Amino acid sequence: MKTTKAAKPTPVKPVAKKAAKKAAQKATAASGKATGVAKKATATIKKAAAASKKAAPAKTAASKKAAPVKTAAKKAAPAKTAAKKAAPAQAAPKKAVVESHAALVRRARRINRELAEVYPYAHPELDFENPFQLVIATVLSAQTTDLRVNQTTPGLFAKYPTPEDLAAANPEEVEEILRPTGFFRAKTKSVIGLSKALAEDFGGEVPGRLEDLVKLPGVGRKTAFVVLGNAFGRPGITVDTHFGRLVRRWQWTDETDPDKVEAAVGALFPKSEWTMLSHHVIFHGRRICHARKPACGACPIAPLCPAYGEGETDPEKARKLLKYEKGGFPGQRLNPPQSYLDAGGIPAPPLGAG
């Protein structure tokens, strides 16, 4: 029996290799295409990034250029805030007005006329019976009140009625009398020296000339004008703390030196009005236009005052700030003029009373 040989399989290896090769080529081609597309995409992204980077500086520059505007606005903010804070001061239009000299003279004289109606009884608030008593009392009034001087001088003049008496006085005894006025040692030296000068150089009489008065110990221009105006009837402006404060508030002058204040204010008024002008202003400063808290709401010259509003403007509260006869209290003098008493003024009590 013949054995039949199995047929050999047809070789397929070359065909598979070719097919595989073609497939690989196609895959490579496809991969190359994909890589190309990816490269193009990457290039596009890079171009976009580069464009974005180029655009960024322009944007930054624009932003920086715009920043100063914002910064300027911020800088302007404090000014705006300051303007808001300054608003109350600008509420008084009188301060913003530039006043001519003629307008200043008119306003100053009107203030004096109105004060003369408010204080028709204005007078020197130191008690005195003759020029000697007035010059001594004025020297003693430094750094204290007229009231304290008025309560002290009766005892002094009772013991030493003339310049000769006071010139020969025992300094220790005088110091004890003057102790309530403060700075009593310096004041004792002044009044004894002043009295000696009167006794030796002026025959025991107070001179009636400015140039002579200012040579006396303890006597300056202010004291001299008090004596000249009230003991001799010769016009003079008394620049004390009240007078200086008020004329600056009223913008009559911005000077602080008493001699310059005297000259500036004197130029606004006839010489004949100087003495009573001083009394009107000082009375107003003591009664209404106080240093720390002016009673603006009770002030009769408020419409003429550039400083209105510095003090209490409520009328009821302002009335409680009034002093002396305006507030219903005693005045400074133990022996005031009859006109003051007729106007409702109350005499001050003597030293140690009540």
Image (tube, rainbow, N blue to C red):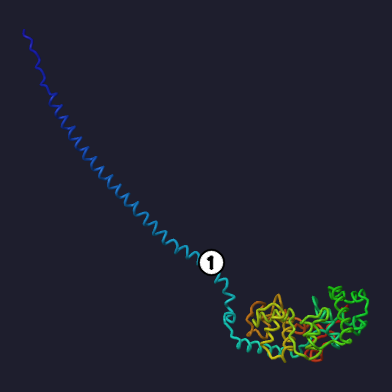
Which of 283 and 37 lies nearest the eye of the viewer? Answer: 283
Image quadrant where residue 85 sits? bottom right
Residue 349 at what x, y percent from top left? 85, 82
Image quadrant where residue 20 sits? top left
Q: Quick one: quadrant of the N terminus?
A: top left
Which of 341 and 271 lies nearest the eye of the viewer? Answer: 271
Amino acid type shown at disc 1: Pro
Residue 23 at what x, y percent from top left? 17, 32
Q: Quick one: quadrant of the C terminus?
A: bottom right
Residue 322 at what x, y percent from top left? 73, 81
On the picture, is 204 further left or further right than 10?
right
Name the residue furthest top.
1
Name the residue furthest front.
201
Which of 291 and 21 lies nearest the eye of the viewer? Answer: 291
Query: Which element is circle 1 on?
Result: helix
At label 1, counting other C-alpha atoms closer than 10 Å, the crowd grade (few under 14, some 14-19, many 20 or more) is few
Which of 9 and 193 lies nearest the eye of the viewer? Answer: 193
Image quadrant where residue 64 sits? bottom left
Q: Residue at x 87, y 74 (%)?
A: 179
On the picture, is 351 further left or further right than 26?
right
Residue 6 at what x, y percent from top left? 10, 15
Q: Which residue is mark 1?
A: 78
Q: Residue at x 26, y 42 (%)?
A: 39
